[in-house]
Image (cartoon, rainbow, N blue to C red):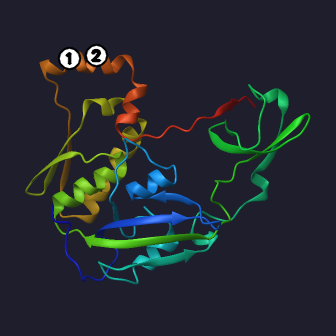
């Protein structure tokens, strides 16, 4: 499959394919589109997709500092950029480190343990006799981030744009047909159980309508007799369906406040 045109200046609204590896200040790799690197750095997800991401410039789908650097270059560029916290994952807020009494934990907290409180994910950073300090800053807050990246191409074909965007939003290359200015997106039945899909499908459609020549996006679910047993089986274990669409669950300890 051809992924577009090279030697074009990157601008707002462009669909580009980018490959990258992100590193923290200590050199630890926290994200990559390279499958081998993911395996080496214990980031590999067997249900994930590797080889590059398709993004739209100007839609805040990547951190500000990386997007700013991308817009300085053309398709085909390969290089490294160092991004300060305020243009990466934000500065660290001391107010987000909170002390919680031990009685609020369902199990004894330990240093580095992830927990969830009122929908917020935090990390135990200090354990005392009667209290534990929990940091609700995101792990990369306050750090200067380095990205090694390559602008693989700009996309010009509407179907490539739509399929690429579907991969960004769902983790899978969705089956999409383009008929004139109408996109027909064939939605897997298991997506009915995906919170990720439920919350992102409207934004995916809006992005396609705004940044391409499409005038309509149709989401189509097709039910056939030979799918009855398969659907029945998946309905019994919906949690496994999230894995099939590259949803990554974070293990945490519930805390009642």
Judge by depth and name the residue closer to the eye, 199 or 151.
Answer: 151
Q: Is residue 117 visible?
A: no
Q: Residue at x 29, y 50 (%)?
A: 166
Give the spatial CA distance, label 1 vs label 2: 6 Å
User: Left or right: where does residue 84 sit relative to residue 257?
Assistant: left
Q: Tell me the quarter of the image containing the N terminus.
A: bottom left
Q: Position of residue 160 (x, y in %)?
A: 20, 59
Q: Secondary structure at mark 2?
A: helix
Does residue 75 sit above or below 127 in this rendering? below
Of all residues, the one furthest to the right in this rendering is: 129
Judge by depth and name the residue closer to the eye, 40 or 233.
Answer: 40
Does residue 45 sit above or below 81 in this rendering? above
Q: Residue at x 56, y 76 (%)?
A: 82
> Which label is found at residue 228?
1
Say which residue label 2 marks. Answer: 232
Q: Quadrant of residue 122?
A: top right
Q: Tell me the quarter of the image containing the C terminus.
A: top right
User: Left or right: where does residue 208 sit relative to residue 148?
Assistant: left
Circles 1, 2 touching at the beta carbon (< 8 Å): yes
Q: Quadrant of residue 198?
A: top left
């Amino acid at each position: 499959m051809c992924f577009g045109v090279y030697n074009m200046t990157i601008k707002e609204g462009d669909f580009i394919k980018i490959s990258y590896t992100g590193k923290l200040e200590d050199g630890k790799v926290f994200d990559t589109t390279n499958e081998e690197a993911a395996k080496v750095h214990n980031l590999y997800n067997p249900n994930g997709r590797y080889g590059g991401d398709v993004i739209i410039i100007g839609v805040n789908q990547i951190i500000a500092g990386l997007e700013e650097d991308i817009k300085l270059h053309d398709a085909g560029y390969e290089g490294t950029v160092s991004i300060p916290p305020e243009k990466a994952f934000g500065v660290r807020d001391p107010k987000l480190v909170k002390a919680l009494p031990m009685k609020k934990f369902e199990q004894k907290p330990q240093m580095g343990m992830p927990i969830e409180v009122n929908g917020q994910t935090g990390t135990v950073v200090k354990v005392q006799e009667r209290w534990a300090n929990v940091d609700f800053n995101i792990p990369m807050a306050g750090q200067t981030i380095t990205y090694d990246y390559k602008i693989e191409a700009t996309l010009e074909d509407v179907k490539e744009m739509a399929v690429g965007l579907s991969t960004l939003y769902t983790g899978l290359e969705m089956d999409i047909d383009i008929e004139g200015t109408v996109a027909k997106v064939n939605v897997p039945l298991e997506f009915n159980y995906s919170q990720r899909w439920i919350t992102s499908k409207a934004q995916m459609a809006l992005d396609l309508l705004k940044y391409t020549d499409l005038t309509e996006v149709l989401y189509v679910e097709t039910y056939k007799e030979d799918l009855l047993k398969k659907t029945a089986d998946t309905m019994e274990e919906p949690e496994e369906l999230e894995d099939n669409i590259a949803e990554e669950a974070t293990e945490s300890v519930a805390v009642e406040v």
